[in-house]
Amino acid sequence: MGALESYLEGRWQAGQGPGTALVDPSTEEGLGSASAAGLDRGAALRYAREVGGKALRALSFERRGAALKALASAIHARREALIELSIAHAGTTRGDAKFDVDGATGTLAAYAAWAAEMPATPFLTDGPALQLGRSPRFVGQHLLVPRRGVAVHINAFNFPAWGQCEKLACAILAGLPVLEKPGTPTAAVAAAVARAIVDSGALPAGAYSILCGEAGDLLEHVGPQDVVAFTGSSATARTLRAHRAFVEHGARLNVEADSLNAAVLGADVQPGSEAFDLFLRDVQKEMTQKSGQKCTATRRVLVPQASVGAVVEALAEGLAGVKVGDPRDDSNRMGPVTSAGQLADVQGGIRRLASAGRLATGGPDRLGSRGFFVRPTLVVAADAHAPVFHAEEVFGPVASVLPWSGDAAEAAALVAAGGGSLVTAVYSDDRRMPAELALELAPWSGRVYLGGARMAEHGTGPGLALPSLVHGGPGRAGGGEELGGLRGLSLYMQRSAVQGFSALIEGAFGGATGVAAARP
């Protein structure tokens, strides 16, 4: 493949020097490199603000949505090539590669559809006009208007297509140009998506850029009207939060970080029941899809004491039967983790978890002499409250079974011990407990997924981030929010209250559909 190029200031540009080597995680064969050394990041952001921002703001929401629809079609037209790139660079199975690519186009298409119902105004109203005094002649109206900056998207390696497009859809529809900084190990997939975006001609000049390689001094050029949306580790997020772009300039920062997502089996669920089987299927899927390298993957499995034996036996048998190997072989159900560093992190994490429990299946040993393969691993905790199970996310095909008493208060406390999650799943056929527990879990969870026999054939599983629902979580999970239908636009827009004479306010701003009313 050679060296990846970046698309900045409306043209493809090559970085200097050898850059970072890109390797096939299944074979460790070199595939190319990525370097952004010598590229002018400040000029790229200025061009995006001055050229791309102005052009996007001149378009109606409907026309921005039409552009998103065209991008979905352009990326879908290259679906097979993107899948092959993902298999080579990310080590994904074909099914997991499709999950990423189709998630990207599906999200773009969803926002394109919502845009068609939006007002023909350059702003959105947020709620009704409010009378501010004794007389109805003096009112205030909250508006949402596009910020005059750039959306800098710093994405993780695990979803190079979907992660890029879910952020892009909201930013472009809101009227903010995008500069994408993909995770380097899988940047070739992100760059191929970028080629489809640029070649489509659907976006005006300056509305889209991509930086392949090191971030360098990118944040030094971020200003008060810019938005940075970051997906990655909590350690990197801490560094970002302390940067002067946010501390001094007040740029907006949205973070999606570590997440110790939990699946809770209700005390009413008996082995062999439909809800029990659904629970097992979902946990195994969330542990092994994309080799466990999903921010929404299940990391903690809360099981009532009476059911621990049955759950561990069934999960261990199912996980041991997952064939791990080169994803080019269709008989393999799980590929490698994405890099040597990732493998080392997963191995270390497994050892730390196992030190406080026992291995039911799997383990830290590397599979084979080449490639970054590790077996699906299930650890059974000796003490569900041991801090190690709630302290860090092992970003691979790894989960821990945490025995609990069956008391809902203990389940809530164990989930909360993780410090904040993207999603918590509860499996029960009880008619009251799931809803009551959901209210206790919601402050610690971006989403609460309630599974049971009545929806077993209809649910998506907890690991699927739908564009209509909020994706993000409190505390350890970063404290940010993405997607959520048109709620996702508010990250890239400024809320401002306009006060004045009621007829003036109504005449100027009353024709726009309120953002709350427009949300799906």
Image (spheres, rainbow, N blue to C red):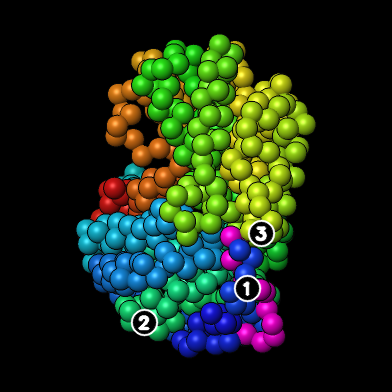
Which residue, given by chain and number where applicable, does mark 1 sit on?
30
* Label 3 residue SS: loop
Which residue, given by chain and number where applicable, does mark 3 sit on?
370
Q: Is residue 18 magenta?
A: yes
- Do the residues bearing badges 3 and 2 touch, measured as CB atoms within 8 Å? no
**Nearer the N terminus, badge 1 or badge 2?**
1
Q: Is residue 65 left or right of residue 350?
A: left
Residue 520, position as x, y percentages in the image: 29, 48
Which residue, given by chain and number where applicable, does mark 2 sit on?
199
Which mark's residue is nearer the viewer, 3 or 1? 3
Q: CA distance from mark 3 to mark 2?
A: 37 Å
Instruction: Name the residue type under label 2.
Output: Asp
- Do the residues bearing badges 1 and 2 touch, measured as CB atoms within 8 Å? no
* Label 2 residue SS: helix
**Nearer the N terminus, badge 3 or badge 2?**
2
Crowding around mark 1 (Cα neighbors within 10 Å: few <14, some 14 to 19, many 20+) is some
**Nearer the N terminus, badge 3 or badge 1?**
1
Instruction: Name the residue type under label 1.
Output: Gly
Q: CA distance from mark 3 to mark 1?
A: 13 Å
The residue lying toward the viewer, choosing from 149 and 277, is 277
The vertical placement of 365 against 112, above or below, is above
The vertical placement of 213 against 370, above or below, is below
Magenta part of the chain: 15-26
